[in-house]
Image (tube, coloured by chain):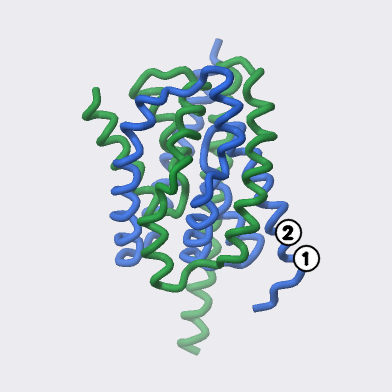
């Protein structure tokens, strides 16, 4: 594998941008990291997804979480209820991803995401 | 309500494993619309959910297939740790309506990138098939 310093620096820079989105929008950042790894660094889709998952194992959002918690913007109870489902669902999804071609699934997800985003932006700014 | 939350978690989890994402991008709007949370509260709660390694089960499946670039993963984790703190400093003073609107714009951008990646890949696959046919 041709792993130059430039490539590493590029990955680090791309990940930092994903991190800004993560703190700004309270998300993991994988949704941006997966397409960026593929588009900029020629990762295959499965490899981009696997690498995104390992990047999300350490608590990368902890500094951002502390900032939100200080502002009183965390619902701990809802969070605790959501964690087991997300974990179990993750295993199920990982098994499914190996069996099916996730291309059409991704297209459907992208379409839903787009509609959801348009709806959110519209409902926030219509007044 | 508790059942709704548990099922919501399961549904988001399937996306985590299937798409290799953290799940926050689906969790935040789901909490805003289904659980009627304020935008800031949904984002803070999403960050809390992402704290434990919820993707570990999914990662195991990818690891078995050799589909993980450990070095790139570590670099990404470092970048995201620092970037996320910077992002939170921008988000917190914003008013909730504007934040919700920007979140919507971000979702549309992410959707376009995801879609574009899919297209490029299928084009490459088609070219390879053409070459194989001669």
- Residue B28: x, y in percent? 45, 31
- Colour displayed for chain B in the image of the structure: green
Q: Tell me the tag on residue A70.
A: none
Decide if residue A90 is on the left or right side of residue B81.
Answer: left
Q: Pinpoint the chain carrying mark 2.
A: A
Above or below — where is B101 with respect to B108? above
Contact between marks 2 and 1 (CB within 8 A): the answer is yes
Decide if residue A11 is on the left or right side of residue A111.
Answer: right
Pointer 2 residue: A10
Pointer 1 residue: A6
Residue B71 or residue A40, whichever sits in front? B71
Above or below — where is A40 with respect to B78? below
Query: Could you give the CA–CA distance between mark 2 and mark 1, rounded to whole angstroms?
Result: 6 Å
Q: Is residue A103 visible?
A: no
Above or below — where is A113 with respect to A54? above
- Colour displayed for chain A in the image of the structure: blue
Above or below — where is A121 with respect to B111? above
Q: Residue at x 35, y 32 (%)?
A: A80
Q: Residue at x 73, y 59 (%)?
A: A10
Determine which quarter of the picture holds residue B82. Answer: top right
Location of the N terminus of chain A (image quadrant): bottom right
Element assignment for label 1:
helix
């Amino acid at each position: 594998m041709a792993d130059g310093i430039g490539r590493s620096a590029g990955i680090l820079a791309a990940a930092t941008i994903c991190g800004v989105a993560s703190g700004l929008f309270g998300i993991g950042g994988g949704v941006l990291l997966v397409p960026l790894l593929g588009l900029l660094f020629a990762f295959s889709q499965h490899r981009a997804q696997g690498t995104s998952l390992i990047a999300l194992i350490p608590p990368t959002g902890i500094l951002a979480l502390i900032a939100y918690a200080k502002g009183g913007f965390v619902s701990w109870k809802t969070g605790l209820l959501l964690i087991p489902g997300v974990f179990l669902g993750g295993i199920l999804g990982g098994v499914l991803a190996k069996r099916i071609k996730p291309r059409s699934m991704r297209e459907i997800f992208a379409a839903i995401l787009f509609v959801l985003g348009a709806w959110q932006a519209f409902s926030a700014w219509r007044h | 309500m508790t059942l709704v939350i548990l099922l919501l978690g399961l549904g988001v989890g399937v996306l985590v494993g299937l798409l290799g994402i953290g799940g926050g991008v689906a969790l935040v709007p789901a909490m805003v619309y289904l659980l009627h949370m304020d935008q800031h509260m949904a984002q803070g709660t999403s960050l809390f959910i992402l704290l434990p390694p919820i993707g570990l089960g999914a990662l195991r499946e990818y690891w078995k297939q050799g589909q993980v670039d450990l070095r790139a993963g570590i670099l990404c984790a470092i970048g995201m740790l620092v970037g996320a703190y910077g992002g939170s400093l921008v988000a917190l003073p914003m008013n909730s309506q504007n934040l919700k609107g920007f979140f919507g714009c971000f979702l549309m951008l992410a959707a376009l990138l995801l879609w574009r990646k899919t297209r490029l890949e299928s084009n490459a696959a088609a070219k390879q098939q053409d070459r194989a046919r001669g």
